[in-house]
Amino acid sequence: MAQIGTFYFDHGNKAIILLHAFASSPVDVRLLARRLEKENYSIYAPLFTGHGTADFTDIITDGSPEKWWQDVVNAIEFVKAKGKTEISIFGISLGGIFAAKALEMYPELVGGGSFGSPIVRNGRSDNVRSTFLQMAVANYRQFKVDEGTIKNKVQWLDDNIDPLLDEINDFANGVAEDLAKIHQPYFIGQGLADEMVDSQSGQRIQEKLINSQVDFHEYPDASHMITVNSAHADLETDLKSFLNRIY
């Protein structure tokens, strides 16, 4: 899937921030954004630092959970600076971890949620590691990098990715510990055929959201990227209903 950068669709006062997955870009949420734009929501989808470039090594050398959290803080401030006073935030996979963190830290947000997000996990998934390397190869080929260079770069990624994955795991654990701080309505979407994240992750998040009204949805045949796969239409319908209730 082609990478794209940050985008902003300016419509009504009701604003939604959408956060993308690890090793990807806002392309993850662009289809969803277009659907919500038609409902007169303003949509902002930032690009996480180190992502969306021709070289996946940038994710490791330039990115970190701390920098991605700052990207989210900047996104909230950007939307506020546009004069939006009713703001919600959602994210897919890695983005869902940061959406939950935002709801913990910004009680003025009206609501939010996560899609296929490993906020509450049982250890680190090896699928994330292997998928990251596969995505790197595809990305380099998309940018016409020669096979010898690809081999060397992927070897470097293989040698250097683990510390970053550990940092992400630690950050997610911190977010999971504070889920009871969330008082806003929270939407959970989980594909039950998720190949990246334990399909019980959504249920675990719900169990920890003891002070939030949770809108929980499972999509039986859907794989990880439910914003763009077979579940996307159902997800859009469910999310529209949720948004109608919180705004």
Image: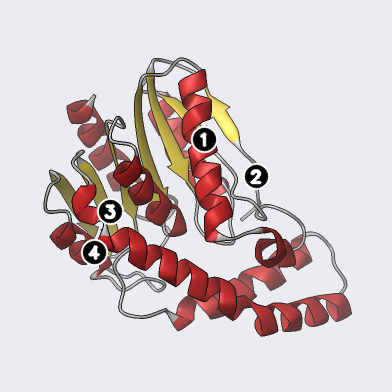
Whether residue 232 is situated above or below residue 33 in the rendered picture: below
Of pointers 1 and 3, the one earlier in the residue sequence: 1
Residue 247 shows in the view: yes
Of pointers 4 and 3, the one earlier in the residue sequence: 3
Q: Which residue occupies the foreground of this view, 32 or 181?
A: 181
Q: Is residue 201 left or right of residue 169?
A: left
Q: How far apart are marks 1 and 2 (CA)?
A: 17 Å
Q: Is residue 89 left or right of residue 80?
A: left
Give the label, 2 or 4, closer to the camera: 2
Q: What residue type is labelled 3?
A: Gly
Residue under label 1, please give it.
75
Q: Distance between the residues labelled 1 and 4?
A: 33 Å
Q: In this view, does 116 lie to the left or right of 136?
A: left
Q: Which residue occupies the foreground of this view, 11 or 233?
A: 11
- Picture residue at 41% right of the left edge, 72% below the top: 196
Residue under label 3, please give it.
189
Q: What residue type is labelled 4?
A: Pro
Residue under label 2, please give it.
4
Q: Do the residues labelled 2 and 4 touch (CB within 8 Å)?
A: no
